[in-house]
Amino acid sequence: MRIPSVVARHLSEDRYSAFARDVIEGLTARPKRLPPKYFYDEAGSHLFEEITALPEYYPTRSELAILGAHAPDMARLFPAQTALIEFGSGSSRKARLMLDAAPSVAAYVPVDISSKWLAAEAERLRRDYPHLAVLPVAADFTHDFRLPRSIAALGRAGFFPGSTIGNFEPHQARAFLQNAARILGEGAILIVGIDLVKDEGLLTAAYNDAAGVTARFNLNLLARINRELGADFDLSRFSHQAFYNRERSRIEMHLVSRVRQKVRVYGRLIELGECETIHTENSYKFTAESFGALARAAGWTPVAAWSDADGYFSVQGLRAAK
Ligand code: SAH
Ligand code: AVI
């Protein structure tokens, strides 16, 4: 499916101005913050893939083990002749496990904000699954977006792995789940990966890897603002910080200003004090109970759950209320 160039230009201009607006809003707020969805330009998507292979970053390995063992059980929840819609598809590596286990899937709709990465992964999938309709949607799933018309006659199953839901604030997670229920329709199934509350040492190590890849992922946000908004962040004047906030059950990532400094961003002068931080990401950790309450509040009923042998991660099967 090709997007006409005029539409594509408008799409990218819209995205661009939303990026500029959100960056200025976040950097002039107190405390300073930047939305984590902007990590994922092409370089950010590459860096995230590197993170998934790090020895300290257990979530991907744990979830892959769960899917490897239980994807056929998950697929049994899908309606016959289904479109599998993945929110934040990244490498689509986990979707491949679902597709291999689910012959009832006739179309795969990867939705991702990282548009170039998405297009490249869709090409690879088309090559490897020649009988599957692969219909990528480059969109921000926190806003309204349209699903391809060609899936209108199919049933729908949603897939939201990776614990990407943990990158939302609780009220945003609830809004996302409500929106997903609307998009997927009555009686639909949603398979969601959640990272579980666990030993604090394991959690903090996963976001402070020895090789410094997570630090590069975090700093790439400033590099992206330099590239796309003509800012003059000096990356050597910032350091990566990640810690567990036990009260809120979340890992927080920040960029810490090493010195007092001024930065020009999109024509605005932004001042940072020594040790002042820019809050770039939260990664909420759940219990089965806390996630169940969130899902129910958003109109979903938990119908199944699978975990890995270590109990690090959980994949939850939800059904939308009729
Ligand atoms: N599902 C994959 C990738 C998870 S990384 C896995 O489990 O390994 C999170 C993915 O969500 C990235 O590919 C990122 O580009 C995408 N993403 C983050 N925020 C998004 C948003 N608001 N809208 C659409 N995609 C988003
Ligand atoms: C995509 N998301 C669930 C990852 C996480 O663990 O919160 C992003 C990430 N941030 C740092 N490392 C990985």
Image (cartoon, rainbow, N blue to C red):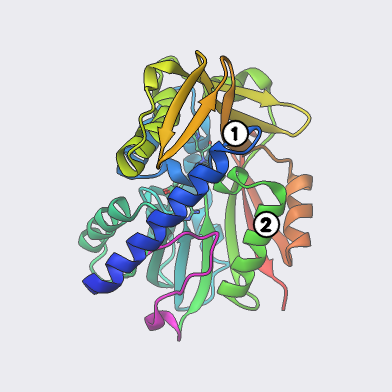
* Residue closest to the eye, 1 or 280: 280
Pinpoint residue 164: horizontal percent, then vertical percent.
Answer: 54, 46
The segment highlighted magenta reads 138-153
In this rendered view, identify the residue nearer to me: 55 or 148: 148
Taking the image as shown, residue 293 lies to the left or right of residue 129, namely: right
Residue 253, which numbered label? none
Beta carbon at label 2 within 8 Å of ligand 1: no
Residue 90, percent across and down? 39, 49
Q: Is residue 306 above or below residue 207?
A: below
Q: Earlier in the sequence, mark 2 or mark 1?
A: 1
Residue 220 screen position, x and y as percent: 38, 32
Q: Quadrant location of residue 15? A: bottom left
> What SS does tag 1 mark?
strand
Residue indicated by mark 1: 32
Q: Nearer the viewer, residue 173 or 289?
A: 173
Q: State the residue position of label 2.
A: 304
User: Residue 137's spot in the image, x, y percent?
Assistant: 38, 66
